[in-house]
Amino acid sequence: MTDPRTTKLAGILINYSLKVKKGERVLINSSSELAKPLVLEVYKKVLEAGAHPIVNIVFEEISNIFYNMATKEQLLDFPKIKLFEARNVDCILNIRAAINKKALSNIDSKKVAERSRVLKPISEAIVNEKRWVLCNFPTNAMAQETDMSLDEYEDFLYGATNINWEKVKKQEMKLKEVLDKGKVVRIVGKDTDLTIGIRGRKAIPCYGERNMPDGEVFLSPVEDTAEGHIYYDLPAIYQGKEVLGIRLIFKKGKVIEASAEKNEAFLISMLDTDKGARYLGEVGIGTNYGIKHFSKDILFDEKIGGTVHVAVGRSYKDAGGKNDSAIHWDMIKDLRPAPEGLNQGNGGAIYVDGKLIQRNGRFCW
């Protein structure tokens, strides 16, 4: 019997997040066969809406096999069919259901970066032109990554997704108003003092239409304005690799120095992916105070109330961003004080045009 929470989530994804209409083509992507319960419920909801479902289920092991066996020619081959598919559907649901969270940990990062550049036109066609939403389906691998049992992780996930998103929307509009009027954001915290220009950029409140769970307000900063330094308290995970203790120094918007306590070589290789990889693509403020447990999953972690994520790489056109890159890497800064904060949080603050808007993870209004 299907968990009723799964059925409820399927309804939220199709009817609220994607707002599927009669006659539309809906692409349902799943990263593994473990998401079958949610895929089936979503499939039903698409049919109930009078739309046309298209299902792609991938075996997780395929990526590992590809990077280990692909020739240079195969690595650089552009999948025209995938681009056609992306351009000819109306909306896309991506479901992640990991079997092994470390599946790509030992893959050559240069190959991954090279393949990302090849696939860039497809990701752009999806991110910038289509309605899309990303969500997780609970698996043992995801639960283990968060130090939870599967039952605990299911409660964690559904507690963050099956909520009143219209209410969340109203709560985020005040923060959007402040950021839309602002010119400069300053982030202060442990080993951190970073100023970022935001004049003329539009803040976007996130309340369940792109990510599930959701809960952030973000914008794409002015590309050449970041000045100062930042230390990321929490692990930054990208392409299956975990990088700890990242420190970045910015000048005229560009990362001019970068170091990490673990996997520094991977960090540098990603920053060298292309010219845009060393510039900021996003500044986001987490607003979901119901997510308190760091899960090593950016889908949840960037939404944690009391954190800010400052991402390198590709910016968002709908937020006024102009930075172009094959990567987009969200890195999280904890602004909550210990012991309430995550790990060794030491508190911090966010200012807009010199006015304090948040201290130690709590808004000042």
Image (cartoon, rainbow, N blue to C red):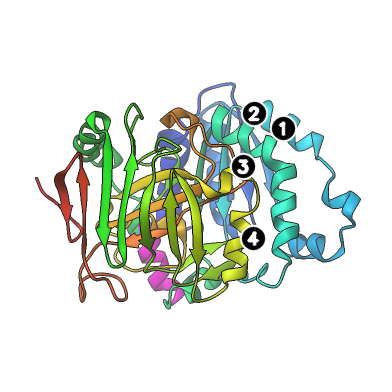
Q: Which residue is mark 1?
A: 85
Q: Which residue is depicted at the point 46% across and 54% down? A: 330
Q: Nearer the viewer, residue 48 or 212?
A: 212
Q: Nearer the viewer, residue 140 or 251?
A: 251
- Tell me which numbered mark, 4 or 1, is placed earlier along the sequence: 1
Mark 3 vs mark 1, CA separation in Å: 12 Å
Q: Which residue is mark 3?
A: 28
- Tell me which numbered mark, 2 or 4, is placed earlier along the sequence: 2
Q: How many marks can you see?
A: 4
Helix, strand or loop under label 3: strand
Helix, strand or loop under label 1: helix
User: Cβ–Cβ below 8 Å for labels 2 and 1?
Assistant: yes
- Tell me which numbered mark, 4 or 3, is placed earlier along the sequence: 3
Q: Is residue 216 above or below residue 139?
A: above
Which mark identifies residue 269?
4
Mark 2 vs mark 4, CA separation in Å: 34 Å
Local crowd at mark 2 within 10 Å, few (<14), some, or many (≥20)?
A: some
Three-letter code for the amino acid on which mark 3 is drawn: Ile
Residue 263 is at least partly visible in this image: yes
Three-letter code for the amino acid on which mark 2 is drawn: Val
Q: Where is residue 174, by image quadrant?
A: top left
Mark 4 vs mark 1, CA separation in Å: 31 Å
Q: Which residue is depicted at the point 41% across and 41% down? A: 12
Magenta stretch in the rendered image: 149-158
Three-letter code for the amino acid on which mark 4 is drawn: Ser
Q: Nearer the viewer, residue 196 or 364?
A: 196
| Position of residue 280 measured from the top left corner of the image (x, y, whole percent) | 46, 45
Local crowd at mark 1 within 10 Å, few (<14), some, or many (≥20)?
A: few
Q: Is residue 180 above or below residue 251?
A: above
User: Cβ–Cβ below 8 Å for labels 4 and 1?
Assistant: no
Mark 4 or 1: the one toward you: 4
